[in-house]
Image (tube, rainbow, N blue to C red):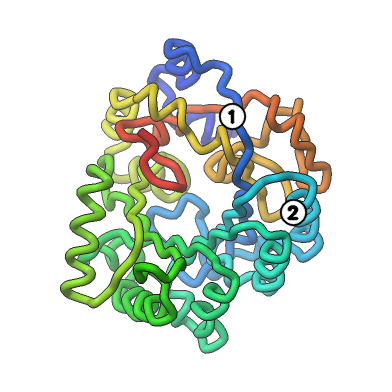
Amino acid sequence: MLNPAQTAGAGFPAFASKLRETGLLPLRPTQLTVLQVNVGKMCNQVCKHCHVDAGPDRTEIMTRETMQQCLDALAKTDIELVDLTGGAPEMNPDFRWFVEGISALGRTTIVRCNLTIIVANKKYNDLPEFFAKHKVRVVSSLPHFAAARTDAQRGEGVFARSMRALHMLNAVGYGVEGSGLSLDLVYNPSGAFLPGNQASLEREFKQRLSREHGVTFNDLLAITNLPVSRFLDYLVESGNYDAYMDKLVQAYNPTAAANVMCRSTISVGWDGLLYDCDFNQMLDLPVARTASQHIRDFDLESLQARAIVVNQHCYGCTAGAGSSCGGATA
């Protein structure tokens, strides 16, 4: 059976050919500044757009041993930012130990928090205080400022629980001007279309959430849905696959391609294997064999010199204003 990465986008121009046309092939790192770590696929939600295919039934979980290997790698480098993802990363039993270790090294931690985990169980209720203590940057998905749109994508009642969590984060200073505690929201479209202008969306989200719910936040990050995992299934089942891929191909932006996140990021799987990005990780496309393959063998020089592995799904990161874990790139 073919890997989904080999079939998704078949019939459209090879992404590598677009890079070649714009002088970017082979795509290589600029400077490695972010270590993105998937600490497990377990999650309290089952979202329709999830590229990790996360959920309560997933058992893949990063061990403390592998987390220590991540800390050892960090200690040997100047990598300044550690981006923790899941699943719900907070569900890993060693999550807090890991954050404390990152903090002890003087590095900044981003946590990709789905918000509802904060109110899912009493043992998570103090997460806002824990985050604040370690100056964690909280990045949270909120598909829309309207409850119906959010619940349609993430499950019934998710919007209301998300508002409760946002109020708890605001209460300790997150998203409050002058607090130094950063709270960013992530928007991704609910259908087979590209996100709108990030700045315009941010203004609208801030106005609506403040006026209707008394919620404040720092930045809105607009992210394009990539044709992988559950979103790919949706595209195929709804008959939108060809039209969506064509939209991505036609919207290819060389400036966005030059600024893709894989040029400054290494992604670590729950088992310690290394990937160019979180999406390649989900498609089982490891870093090139010229580079270290596992976090225990982390070698910055070989990773900086590698050619980044690309495939058709990469069109999602280079369409229009571009897309990365940090939002628009162009």
Name the residue at 78% across, 42% down: 298
- Residue, disc 2: 70
Task: Determine whether the residue tagged by mark 2 lies in a helix, strand or loop.
Answer: helix
Name the residue at 30% across, 32% down: 320
* Residue closest to the eye, 314 or 133: 133
Residue 22, percent across and down? 43, 14
290 to the left or right of 44: right
Residue 77, percent across and down? 74, 44
Q: Quadrant of the C terminus?
A: top left
* Residue closest to the eye, 224 or 190: 224
Going by the numbered disc 1, the residue's amino acid type is Thr
Q: How far apart are the two marked residues, 2 and 1, measured between alpha carbons?
A: 21 Å
Q: Quadrant of the N terminus?
A: top right
* Residue closest to the eye, 301 or 125: 301
Q: Is residue 215 above or below residue 227?
A: below
Q: Examine the image and state in which quarter residue 240 appears.
A: top left
- Residue, disc 1: 30
Residue 189, percent across and down? 28, 49
Name the residue at 27% across, 40% down: 194
Q: Earlier in the sequence, mark 2 or mark 1?
A: 1
- What number of labels is visible? 2
Q: Quick one: which residue is furthest to the bottom in this view?
A: 122
Residue 306, percent across and down? 68, 26
Name the residue at 60% across, 24% down: 28
Going by the numbered disc 2, the residue's amino acid type is Cys
223 to the left or right of 31: left
285 to the left or right of 65: left
